[in-house]
Amino acid sequence: MMRFAHLQPSLRYIGHELKFLRYLLNRGYDNNLINAVPPIKTSQRPHRTGSIDPRTFAELRKHMPRPVERYVIGLWETGWRINELRKLNWDNHTHDGKPLVDLENRVVRLNPEDVKEDYPRVTPITKEMMKVLIELRALPSKNGSVFVRDNGEPILSMRAMFNRARELAGIPGAIPHDLRRSTIRRWEAAGVPRGAVMQATGHRANTVHEQYAFLNEDELVQVFIKAGLVTLLKVVPIKKAARYIAR
């Protein structure tokens, strides 16, 4: 090995190696093998800034089976990372006893250990997300998983179907994380303050002001209601726990 010590690897070679390392770390994170992915920066290209506009998203959805479409809508309506959505469970609760999926209070939650930022996540349930959750609540579910196929089996991966749909929709370069960026841009365009957007999607505060401007659950929901993103209708259980109506 010493005879190669004088050789300096090119930036392109280093970039490829770092890209592969980042891929392995992301796969490990997606499969809950590691708790976090350290930032890996290269000088080869700038950070990806791609997003998907609503018209293109509607076209993308057309080429997906309904179970996968529901999952992708979940990503589009929460701004969550692809692996985080799989952790929603009808039967599980936060450490202070609140349900992860709270249709009555119009929020979904995750515990600190289930998110990248290692801080409790609370995200208001938007109008479209509410429709999807009510639809899913009426389906059987093995292990209490929220995003399931029609037979109750949890969706463990949707990348293959996403890749197929993006080709048919004419956006071959799109990736699931583009949905997260799209959500952030849509919410800011709708008038949601940046601090509230960061809080709901799981971004760390950039400034001291944003740290002190942290909203409680009710305040966060009210911000989204004011922006027209969350329904004013009260969602309540009727008779069977698996059925909900809006009133």
Image (tube, helix red, strand yellow):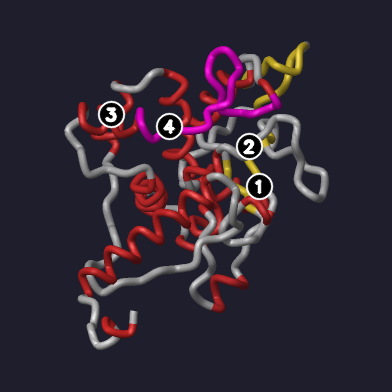
User: Residue 163 versus residue 85: which sits nearer the camera?
Assistant: 163
Q: How far apart are marks 4 and 1 (CA)?
A: 21 Å
Q: Residue at x 53, y 52 (%)?
A: 29
Q: Nearer the viewer, mark 2 or mark 4?
A: 4
Q: Identify which amino acid the numbered label 4 is placed on.
A: Met
Q: Identify which amino acid the numbered label 3 is placed on.
A: Arg
Instruction: Name the spot of residue 186 as percent of width and height, x first.
Output: 36, 47
Q: Residue at x 52, y 24 (%)?
A: 131
Q: Which of the two labelled residues, at mark 3 and mark 2, occupies the earlier sequence position?
A: 2
**Circle 4 sits in a helix, a strand or a loop, which is it?**
loop
Instruction: Name the spot of residue 205 as percent of width and height, x first.
Output: 53, 69
Q: How far apart are marks 2 and 4 (CA)?
A: 16 Å
Kindly identify which residue carries mark 2. Answer: 88
Q: How far apart are marks 3 and 2 (CA)?
A: 25 Å
Kindly identify which residue carries mark 4. Answer: 158
Q: Tell whether label 3 touches label 4 (CB within 8 Å).
A: no
Q: Nearer the viewer, mark 3 or mark 1?
A: 3
Side (left or right) of 55 relative to 138 = left
Side (left or right) of 188 relative to 3 = right
- Determine crowd level at label 2: few under 14, some 14-19, many 20+ residues with C-alpha closer than 10 A: many
Residue 164's disc is 3
Give the total of numbered labels: 4
Pick out the residue farthest to the right. 97
Q: Tell whether label 1 touches label 4 (CB within 8 Å).
A: no
Quarter that holds the C terminus: top right
Instruction: Name the spot of residue 202 as percent of width and height, x first.
Output: 54, 56
Kindly identify which residue carries mark 1. Answer: 110
Q: Residue at x 51, y 76 (%)?
A: 207
Q: Which of the two labelled residues, at mark 4 and mark 3, occupies the earlier sequence position?
A: 4
Q: Tell whether label 1 touches label 3 (CB within 8 Å).
A: no
Segment colored magenta: 143-161
